Image: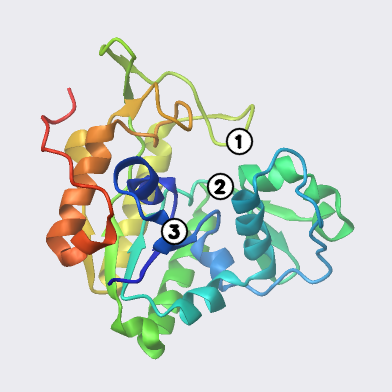
Amino acid sequence: MPRIAIVGSCITRDLWPIRGGGAEALLYVSRTSLPSLLSSRVEGFRPSETLPADLHRNEHNALVADVRKTALSTLLAWRPTHIIFDFIDERFDLLAIGSSLVSNSGEMIRSGYRTQPVLEKVRTISRLSDTCDRIWQAAAVEFAALIRATPLAHAQLILHSARWAESKRLADGRIAPIDRVEVTSGQPVVIADYNAVLARQEAAFESLLPVAKIDAGAFRLADAEHRWGESPFHYVPEYYDEVRRQLTALGLADAFSAPLAEPSAPAA
């Protein structure tokens, strides 16, 4: 039975709860960034004993892991047979706190932790800046070296090629453009800018590591009725089915407990 780790976002994790079953057998590392994953922990951070604000347990766990830098040791201890990467969560700005970097995720903002003294005085590094690009590229080189030097070298590496959809399918089947998008509340952004970041990141990652690439771009259409709400990376069911078919072709059929859906036509 494969032991699968996801270092990425809901676009990969949702294959299981939405289209495949068996999500309890996964290790899911999310709401982080390669630079943050490899960074030193934030000293003096004190997570709440109760869930802050409206965060769910899994959201809070991911946030705390990003600040305390426990995700990497958890990944190594998991000894995965397969690691699936996607970079959709690489949309958030980074926060520089002394020698540490953390992801300024929606969960970080909602949690209220930015009011803690250790997190009040930080430097924000824009995701779209050249500085962030350089930091990410350097982290990718370091991460590739870590994989080669640890038991992770024995895992099959899979890159789930990720882009934000520019159109959505409405409940009545009509296709409409996605007009306003925000990374964090109140900050409208341009989809093409973030897709360009993803393209650069994927090209760098593929140049550093031997990865099997899966790409369901022909089905990349947002679902206005998605269970998690409308978003450029909350896709129609056909998208997840196509990704699952490609994972099955890579030998991961046993990772899913539900039957594979019949092939359907590409998104309109």
Q: Along the horizontal axis of the image, is 28 left or right of 125?
A: left
Secondary structure under tag 3 reads helix
Task: Reply above or below: 229 against 208.
Answer: above
Secondary structure under tag 1 reads loop
Q: Along the horizontal axis of the image, is 65 left or right of 199?
A: right
Tell me the colour scheme of the image. rainbow
Q: Where is residue 67, by image quadrant? A: bottom right
Tell me the crowding category of disc 3: few under 14, some 14 to 19, or many 20 or more residues within 10 angstroms, Cα based.
few
Q: Along the horizontal axis of the image, is 156 left or right of 265?
A: right
Residue at 48%, 21% (x, y): give it: 180
Percent position of residue 260, x then y: 18, 46
Tell me the crowding category of disc 1: few under 14, some 14 to 19, or many 20 or more residues within 10 angstroms, Cα based.
some
Percent position of residue 1, x then y: 27, 72
Q: Where is residue 160, by image quadrant? A: bottom left
Percent position of residue 101, x then y: 65, 64
Q: Are the two marked residues, 2 and 1, in contact with CB atoms closer than 8 angstroms?
A: yes
Residue at 59%, 52% (x, y): give it: 58
In this rendering, which labeled residue sits more in front, label 1 or label 3? 3
| Residue type of the residue flagged with mark 2 | Phe
| Marks 2 and 1, the one that precedes in the sequence | 2
| Residue type of the residue flagged with mark 1 | Thr
> In the rendered image, which residue does mark 3 sit on?
24
Tell me the crowding category of disc 2: few under 14, some 14 to 19, or many 20 or more residues within 10 angstroms, Cα based.
many
Residue 92: image tag: 2
Residue at 23%, 74% (x, y): give it: 210
Task: Reply above or below: 201 against 162.
Answer: below
> In the rendered image, which residue does mark 1 sit on?
184
